[in-house]
Image (cartoon, rainbow, N blue to C red):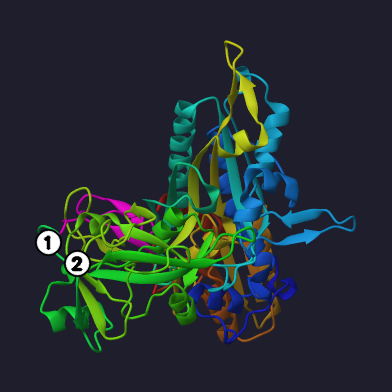
Amino acid sequence: MRVSQLFGETLREAPAEAEVASHRLLVRAGYIRQLAAGIFSYLPLAQRALRKIEQIIREEMQAIGAQEVTLPVVHPAELWQQSGRWQAIDETMARFRDRRGRDLLLAMTHEEVVAELARSEIRSYRQLPQTIFQIQTKFRDEPRPRAGLIRTREFTMKDAYSLDRDEAGLQRQYAAHYQAYLRIFARCGLPVIAVGSDVGMMGGQQAHEFMYLTPIGEDTLVICAACGYAANQEVARFRTEPYDGGAPRAIAKVATPGATTIAALAAMLEIDPRQTAKAVFYTGDWGPEQPAHLIIAVVRGDMEVNPTQVLHLSGARALRPAQPEEIAAAGAVAGYGSPVGVDRTKAMIIVDELVAEATNLVAGANEPGYHLLNTNAGRDYVPHAVGPIALATEGAPCPTCGQPLQVQRGVEVGNIFQLGTRYTQALGAFYLDEDGVQRPIVMGSYGIGVGRLLACIAEHYHDERGLCWPIAVAPYQVALVALAKQDTTRAAAEELYAELQRAGIEVLYDDRDVSAGVKFADADLRGLPLRLTISERSLAQGGVELKRRNAATARQVPLEEAVAAVQAEIAALHQTPPTDTAN
């Protein structure tokens, strides 16, 4: 490809809304353009890189026996109503009606469709196991798209689905996908870690996320450097030490003017924060069939609330911080709140297991300027649910080895779920076993965000001059830069371009009539792994200059050996792990 004919120009400045390096550089280098919030056009350079990523994914999926399909982008509402997700998912799902008034949606994922296919195609245990996958457009109406391709509304996703006769088969497929994902990300050059995660809207009994660790990540991960324990903070556990306040004592009200925080309360009463109970107020959304109402989450004062676990225990489909008037409507007071004395018909009380076990904790009196001494769950208030709703934080003891946990940020580039029979039971996907007994098919679901993976690679491999693509995903392998003032030099450049193409080398030839500085700056910005420069000076010295994108200097190569030298460099780059160039 000649740069003079390439669709998509480089930009000297990035758009003001580009907040992360990958977004800035992909726009500046002419890879992507934003059409609307969270919706992007992928220009030829990005398209070539995406196709290489997709080919790596295809090869690894096919290596574990998966077959490629294409499933519809538009789904009838009935399938999602049968699974229960039509009601459970908020406005993130794009719903609409056709001209006949039938409810439809834009695909977020395809569990329901696959379960419906399994119902129609699979009859016997002899047809199992099966795995199918696709690489296809999805749409989720994210409320806050951000960071370029890191969080979009329209995106390309590889989603795979395993179908098995039993849990043992699911475990084998889950393990095969786990290893395939590690190979995919390694081949793309992106370092990831696998962490235990929340099943979220997918449901099922177990899930893992594959995370690229980066400060720009929107997921919080809890990691133990000592033993390797790793989990999304939403599901992370930690060792806990119960607080024993002795035999329950009589409740008593005490004046605590201005003590609206646990720190201020503990200082005023000269007690350890472990002796207090902290109330955090949310409003839960259960969908249109049930009105939203207050949730009071209670943890020990030395801990924080994990909203994901509160969500699960409450059964709500979404949470948001409660407004003062919503708190007051249940008889509670922000800053001095607790479950004691609230109207249980207007508030759901969810208590952490450590609070349920503790005795004589100090809690809010639901009266400005006052707290209660010696509150006890079960005696002074009855929880609607008890569970582990405390958040794992920096320095908490690892649940496996007891060493301090670390908290880091990450971007999820892939996920795998053990769905079990949730969808197949709901949509009637059964098979007959050897004894003629009808049993539900057991499913797994496995996703990779292709555009997000591209963005994370760009985030990891760049420097102050531009992108630095690993050879496996680079849109072209070589940037050929011609600095020609004479016809003989132009002819030599054209012949070298033709020779590279005949050798099967992917080359982007900068044949424009612009300055050397512009050509070099654009080559660095686009980030191709190798650069060949041909000029009157290089020819006078016997050949061309060959330089790796991340090398400080170039080397001279005889013109007649240029193609062989490039081939050797490409082979070496494929065999050598990419150099980390992330800032």
Can you tell which quarter of the image residue 219 is in? bottom left
Q: x and y percent of residue 177 in the render?
A: 48, 40
Mark 1 lies on residue: 245
Q: Residue placed at 54% from the left, 49% from the top?
A: 202
Q: Which mark is residue 491?
A: none
Residue contact between numbered discs 2 and 1, judged by CB atoms under 8 Å: yes
Closest to the observer, 25 or 438? 438
User: Is 431 placed above or below 295 here?
Assistant: above
User: Could you tell me which secondary element the residue under label 1 belongs to?
Assistant: loop
Q: Residue placed at 72% from the left, 75% from the top?
A: 4
User: Is 107 placed above or below 23 here?
Assistant: above
Closest to the observer, 3 or 228? 228
Residue segment shown in magenta: 220-243
Tag 1 or tag 2, which sits nearer the N-term? Answer: 1
Given the image, on which type of amino acid does mark 2 rest? Leu
Closest to the observer, 557 or 318? 318
Mark 2 lies on residue: 361
